[in-house]
Image (cartoon, rainbow, N blue to C red):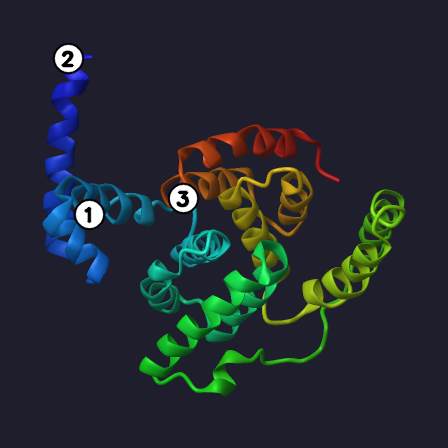
Amino acid sequence: MKLLSTLIPTLMVSLSAQVTAQDVVPDTPAAREARETAPQLFAYTQSVLFGDLWKRTELTPRDRSLVTLSSLLANGQAAQMTSHINLALDNGVKPSEIIGLITHLAFYTGWPNAMSAVGIAKSVFKQRGITPDKTRPESSELLPVDKAAEAERAAAVKENVAPIAPELARYTDDVLFADLWRQPDLAPRDRSLITAAALIARGQLDQLSFHLNKARESGLTKTQAAEVATQLAFYAGWPRAMSALPIIKAVYAQPDK
């Protein structure tokens, strides 16, 4: 423990020196306030959040932006979305994908959160000279479905949802999965990724196993899923990230289909 207590400050100083030179913390009002008022928080932001976490290779910067935006939108943290929409664009997320994320998560985190995010995205796009045509998907054709998997899902809804809330079952089948999940503005893996991230960020884990399985089928690896939880520890809090780990473990312990 004595050795550890000696090494940690040294590591923090080293990391801080590196990221100061690189100036990786976005220059936002919140960052400036933290630098002045909460210097230790700013030091962690500099050395750990942007100096280490965002540089880890287990997820691409693009994936980290998708996960982070999902968390911010899911928890109604609009004040941080401007800088992260800008960062997402810098990390290769297309404007149409950002709008796709907002639209998708309206169904999973609520309309008010999504509607609030639309105005922020519009402001960022305007500042960057992104025209409305760039926010629309290149194709209007719905993506194909896996008929066997869709039949299994629909049967579960018919058995468990329809007897109690028939209209919810109808919306689930006809809107959520027959239309939203087939929209071409997001790849299936990205759609599953942002859904799982939003569920973890909100602490709504009952549906996580289903969506992690969909993400796994779309190519999300166990390492990447664990890194999603790691990213969310910083943006949604340690308890929610830690609570997701047993589900991630269980999903990836299953044999491949």
Q: Which residue is mark 1?
A: 46
Q: Quadrant of residue 207 in the image?
A: top right
Q: Earlier in the sequence, mark 3 or mark 1?
A: 1
Q: With respect to residue 22, does 239 lie above or below?
A: above
For label 2, count other residues whose C-alpha is less than 10 Å away and answer few (under 14), some (14-19) or many (20+). Answer: few
Query: Badges 2 and 3: C-beta atoms under 8 Å apart?
Result: no
| Quadrant in the picture for the N terminus | top left
Q: Which residue is mark 2?
A: 2
Viewer can see residue 25: no
Kind of residue at badge 2: Lys
For label 3, count other residues whose C-alpha is less than 10 Å away and answer few (under 14), some (14-19) or many (20+). Answer: many
Q: With respect to residue 84, does 12 lie above or below?
A: above
Kind of residue at badge 3: Gln
Q: Earlier in the sequence, mark 2 or mark 3?
A: 2
97 displayed left or right of 39: right
Q: Which residue is mark 3?
A: 231
Percent position (x, y) of residue 37? 13, 48
Label 1 sits on a secondary structure element that is helix
Label 3 sits on a secondary structure element that is helix
Label 2 sits on a secondary structure element that is helix
Q: With respect to residue 85, does 56 lie above or below?
A: above
- Between the residue at mark 1 and the residue at mark 2, the CA separation in whole angstroms equals 25 Å
